[in-house]
């Protein structure tokens, strides 16, 4: 039985439009090789025009990674030599570390929560013998009737 990793690898080999997925996998494996404090600071990694772009989550991390650029480059070169799927990383001429402000999700704002109108009119029968449950259901029925108007 094939695993999900095997399926993804076969898709990457057969279809050229999955090359960005293979690059993502290489970047993720490269980040795993870095020390844990660097792993936590990196937001994402990108590669374009023989330049590796590393975006960090906070400006203080940018200074720290710039200070350790030589260490990152040496890890990158040895990783690219040993991992043949990631040979495109050998083409890296420059390493740029930037601070990337990440936008917060809008779901955190209470204003963006959608208000869905109540479709029930609260006109249902309560046929329960237990008094506690009957009381709870009556309260729900009253809440529904208030929200209809």
Image (cartoon, rainbow, N blue to C red):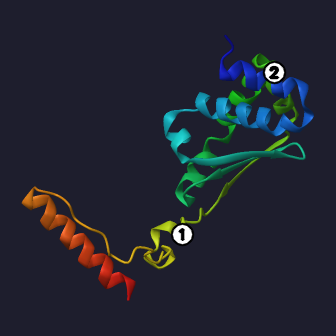
- The image quadrant where one finds the C terminus is bottom left
Left or right of 104: which side holds 87? Answer: right
> What label sits on residue 10 in the rendered view?
2
Q: Which mark is residue 28?
A: none
Question: Are there few (<14), some (14-19), or many (20+) residues within 10 Å of tag 1?
Answer: few
**Which residue appears at 81% of the width and 21% of the height?**
10
Residue at 62%, 41% (x, y): give it: 68
Q: Residue at x 66, y 17 (%)?
A: 3
Side of 67 where 111 appears, left or right: left
Residue 106 is labelled as 1
Question: Which residue is the extreme one toward the bottom?
Answer: 149
User: Where is residue 11 drawn, in percent x and y?
Assistant: 82, 27
Q: Inspect this view and state whether residue 123 appears.
A: yes
The answer to whether mark 1 and mark 2 are in CB contact below 8 A is no
Is 56 located above or below residue 94 in the figure? below
Quadrant hosting residue 141? bottom left
Local packing at callout 2 (Cα closer than 10 Å; few below 14, some 14-19, many 20+) is few
What secondary structure is found at the residue carrying circle 1?
helix
Residue 120 x %, y %: 40, 73
In what element is the residue under mark 2?
helix
């Amino acid at each position: 039985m094939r695993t999900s990793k095997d399926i993804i690898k076969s898709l990457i080999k057969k279809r050229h439009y999955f090359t960005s997925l293979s690059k993502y996998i290489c970047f993720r494996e490269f980040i795993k090789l870095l020390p844990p404090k660097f792993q936590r600071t990196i937001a994402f990694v990108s590669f374009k025009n023989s330049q590796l772009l590393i975006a960090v989550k906070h400006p203080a991390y940018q200074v720290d990674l710039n200070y350790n650029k030589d260490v990152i480059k040496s890890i990158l070169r040895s990783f690219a030599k040993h991992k043949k799927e990631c040979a495109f990383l050998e083409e890296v001429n420059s390493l740029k570390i930037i601070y990337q402000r990440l936008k917060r999700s809008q779901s955190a704002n209470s204003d963006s929560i959608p208000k869905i109108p109540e479709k029930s009119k609260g006109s249902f029968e309560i046929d329960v013998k237990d008094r506690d449950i009957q009381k709870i259901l009556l309260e729900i029925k009253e809440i529904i009737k208030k929200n209809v108007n």
